[in-house]
């Protein structure tokens, strides 16, 4: 639909709706990763008959698979161009691209564990100026001199302190709400045994979860050295291995290519978890988590798993991030020693409270995300909140590893 259309299909459709007079909330989804985080927000609105939630997929380099992910949830989307031509009472986004064009107040939320990766575009920074993380930067919060979001949700008080230095114009709309993944993982810890049974982890078996973010210095980038280590030096049936690869890797390279690169793992007890899967239960079920500077590795510190890092690259981490804190206390995997020996050594040498500072850095409002986030959204909508608590559900029960393995094999055959 071209710019300047006076009667978008959304408005036309409104004449035929059964429930009318609703406040309209636009959920702007850029990637699968952003969609997974936004579920924590639009899920707060789904049962309210006063609110109509509309979804659109905004252009993004890693947008492949996003529409299909939403379709799997039973969600249809309106074209981005149409969303830009329609007025909404509120918009919610986890990314910044294009949101300044929306005809609605915008709520921005973060999409990871703290703010790990520093700003990549440094063209507007002064010589010697430290690179702030994206969501704390002027580039991601301002359009020209205009502050874009009506509210920005942060996980930790530390973020607001950093914001005062990097983009003080946004302090008036900054809110500390906590982190939904922290709250869900915490709520699910009591169900660890249940998750392990669902995954098919038998008595005496131990689960190794390998996590990878996307981009430079990621676990996936060095799989050429890690996979032979997994295949050739692992004790076999006593251990199960699950690979949690960032959805951006699938979106950037294509699912067929990712599965092809990992073809040697099939039939060897190493399971590639689909990018759309809920990963929180896997972290809770793990005995060891091997990962990089990505969010999932940091979230692993909330669980009872022993942590190992595949690499440490300070240039890819904000110095105040949970990932940077973890790099100072977690052992680093060596490519020249048997993996099983390193796992056992890390487990034996783990100190009580070794990851406590990292876990505490993920949220300064534990257990509060859903309550605080709902309050912000309803205030901006001008509606009273529902007369019930905002429920924090534990992660859903996952499919078995065997089922994921079979799905990966079927995808490879296609």
Image: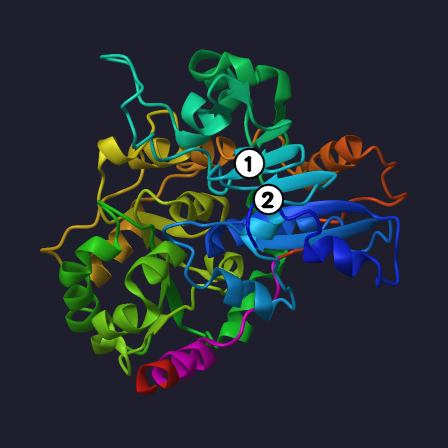
Query: Most prominent secondary structure in the magenta stretch?
Result: helix
Which residue is at 31% across, 77% downward? 269
Quadrant of the drawing holding the C terminus: bottom left
Of the pair 93 and 179, the residue shown nearer to us: 93
Which residue is at 58% across, 70% downward? 72
Read off the residue under disc 2: 84
**Quick one: SS at disc 1?**
helix
* Residue 92 drawn at (x, y percent): 63, 41
Residue lying farthest to the left in this orientation: 336
* Residue 14 drawn at (x, y percent): 80, 57
The number of discs equals: 2
What's the distance in space between the residues labelled 2 and 1, CA to CA?
A: 6 Å
Q: Measured along the vertical axis of the image, is residue 229 above or below residue 214?
A: below
* Magenta span of residues: 395-409
Read off the residue under disc 1: 101
Which residue is at 41% across, 59% downward? 287
Residue 185 visible in this rendered orientation of the protein: no
Of the pair 351 and 138, the residue shown nearer to us: 138
Marks 2 and 1 in Cβ contact (< 8 Å): yes
Q: Is residue 404 magenta?
A: yes
**Quick one: SS at disc 2?**
helix
Q: Measured along the vertical axis of the image, is residue 246 above or below residue 359?
A: below
Q: Measured along the vertical axis of the image, is residue 398 above or below residue 245?
A: below
* Residue 204 drawn at (x, y percent): 41, 73
Quadrant of the drawing holding the N terminus: bottom right
Which residue is at 79% across, 31% downward? 379
* Residue 184 drawn at (x, y percent): 61, 50
């Amino acid at each position: 639909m071209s710019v300047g259309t006076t009667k978008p299909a959304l408005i036309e459709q409104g004449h035929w709706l059964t429930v009318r007079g609703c406040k309209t909330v636009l959920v702007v989804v850029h990637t699968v990763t952003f969609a997974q985080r936004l579920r924590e927000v639009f899920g707060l609105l789904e049962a309210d008959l006063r609110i109509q939630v509309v979804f659109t997929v905004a252009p993004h380099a890693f947008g492949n698979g996003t529409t299909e992910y939403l379709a799997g949830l039973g969600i249809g989307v309106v074209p981005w161009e149409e969303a830009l031509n329609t007025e909404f009472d509120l918009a919610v986004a986890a990314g910044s691209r294009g949101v300044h064009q929306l005809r609605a107040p915008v709520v921005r939320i973060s999409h990871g564990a703290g703010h790990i990766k520093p700003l990549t575009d440094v063209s507007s920074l002064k010589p010697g100026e430290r690179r702030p993380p994206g969501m704390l930067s002027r580039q991601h919060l301002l359009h020209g001199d205009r502050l874009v979001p009506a509210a920005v949700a942060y996980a930790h008080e530390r973020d607001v302190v950093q914001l005062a230095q990097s983009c003080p114009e946004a302090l008036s709309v900054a809110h500390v709400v906590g982190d939904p993944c922290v709250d869900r993982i915490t709520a699910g810890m009591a169900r660890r045994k249940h998750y392990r049974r669902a995954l098919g982890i038998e008595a005496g078996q131990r689960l190794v979860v390998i996590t990878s973010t996307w981009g430079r210095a990621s676990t996936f980038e060095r799989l050429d050295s890690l996979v032979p280590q997994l295949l050739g030096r692992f004790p076999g049936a006593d251990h199960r291995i699950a690979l949690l690869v960032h959805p951006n890797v699938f979106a950037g390279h294509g699912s067929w290519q990712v599965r092809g690169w990992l073809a040697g793992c099939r039939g060897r007890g190493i399971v590639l978890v689909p990018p759309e899967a809920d990963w929180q239960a896997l972290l809770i079920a793990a005995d060891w988590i091997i990962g990089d500077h990505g969010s999932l590795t940091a979230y692993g510190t909330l669980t009872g798993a022993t942590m190992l890092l595949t690499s440490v690259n300070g240039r890819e981490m904000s110095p105040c991030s949970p990932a940077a804190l973890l790099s100072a206390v977690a052992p680093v995997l060596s490519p020249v020693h048997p993996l099983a020996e390193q796992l056992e050594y890390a487990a034996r040498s783990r100190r009580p409270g070794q990851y406590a500072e990292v876990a505490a850095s993920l949220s300064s409002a534990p257990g509060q995300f859903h309550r605080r986030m709902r309050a912000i959204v309803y205030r901006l909508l001008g509606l009273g909140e529902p007369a019930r608590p905002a429920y924090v559900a534990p992660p859903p029960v996952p499919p078995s590893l065997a089922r994921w393995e079979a799905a990966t094999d079927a995808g490879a055959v296609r």
